[in-house]
Image (cartoon, rainbow, N blue to C red):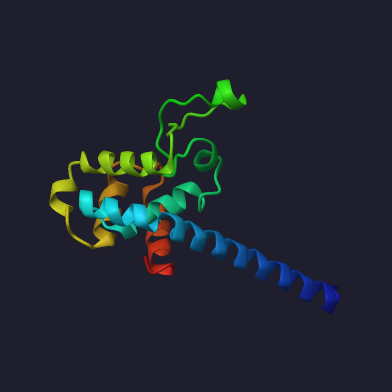
Amino acid sequence: MRSVGSKVLFLALLYLGCVNISFAQTKYINNHKSIADSLSKAYGIPSSVILGIAILESGNGQSRNSKLLHNHFGIVGSNKLKQTHGIKSRYRQYSSAMGSFIHFCKLISGKYFYSRLKGTDDASKWVDAISKSGYSTHPQTWKTRILKTISRYNL
């Protein structure tokens, strides 16, 4: 049977882990919100959708793809990671986070649903359409996670 001390320690570590995750997401939002807002104005895609997808796909900016490739959206393509770091990756490399955000918006603006949704703020409709377009290999789970992220952080 566990002692009271070990239970307290476990709960403290669990709490600190949650605080750290929350801090990482808050920091990510603060660092990228202005990019999402400006691209929202330019492309008519809600900034909540842009930021929600970026948070999930980049692991709050902590994923290897976001750190080494500046890829915040899990977009597949060419990179030089094998030559520079000896790591094989199928994800596209960008020169900056901004490049990744812009490319994501360009990709979405080329989708069949874009003209129908452009300028609307209904994140649920956008995420549903993106999930059905083949963006994710697990569309229903992905959609649920994006919408929860948008809701949780009041994006």
**Is residue 128 at least partly visible in the picture?**
no
**Image-based side of 45 in relation to 73, left or right:** left
Residue shown at 22% from the left, 50% from the top: 42
Q: Position of residue 131 (x, y in %)?
A: 32, 48
Residue 149 appears in view? yes
Image quadrant in which the C terminus is located: bottom left
Choose between 153 and 97: the one closer to the eye.
Answer: 97
Which residue is at a point 49% across and 63% down the rendered structure image? 26
x, y percent for residue 100 = 38, 40
Q: On the picture, is 22 further left or further right than 55?
A: right
In this view, the residue farthest toward the top is 83
Position of 120 relative to 138 (above/below): below
At 82% from the left and 72% from the top, the residue drawn is 6
Which residue is farthest bottom?
Answer: 4
The quarter in which the N terminus is drawn is bottom right
Q: Report the front residue among 128 and 34.
A: 34
Identified at 38% across, 58% down, the residue is 33
Quadrant for residue 148, please give it: bottom left
Query: Does 90 appear above or below 30?
Result: above
